[in-house]
Amino acid sequence: MTDAGTTTASRDGAARFAIAPEVWTTPERRALSQMARSFVEREIAPKLAEWEH
């Protein structure tokens, strides 16, 4: 695993990965997140009800 995350085991033995919060706080990551959010709000959310039927 990289410095950005750690691996832990759950009770069922499955590996769980925890990503360090600072990985997501770069300006580029915040911009990407906002761009994805805007796209979903603009292009997907308005059509969701139509697609579910």
Image (tube, helix red, strand yellow):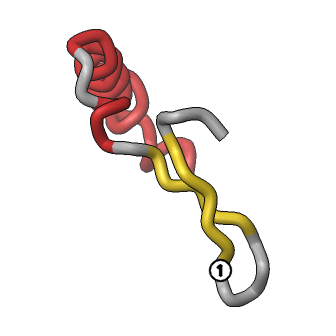
Query: Residue 37 location, x and y as percent?
Result: 30, 29
Which residue corresponds to the image point at 49% horizontal and 54% vertical from the top-left?
Answer: 18
Specify the amino acid type for callout 1.
Ser
Label 1 crowding class (10 Å Cα cut-off): few <14, some 14-19, many 20+?
few
Instruction: Give the SS element for disc 1.
Output: loop
Q: Residue furthest front?
A: 3
The residue at the point 43 percent across, 49 percent down is 49
Q: Is residue 52 depicted above or below 40 in this figure?
A: below
- The residue that label 1 is drawn on is 10
* Corner quadrant of residue 39: top left
Which picture quadrant has residue 24?
A: top left
Q: Is 45 placed above or below 40 here?
A: below
**Which residue appears at 21% of the width and 13% of the height?**
27
The N terminus lies in which quarter of the figure?
A: top right
Q: Is residue 7 left or right of residue 40?
A: right
For this rendering, which residue is in front, 4 or 14? Answer: 4
Residue 10 relative to residue 30: left or right: right
Instruction: State the image quarter where residue 7 is shown.
Output: bottom right
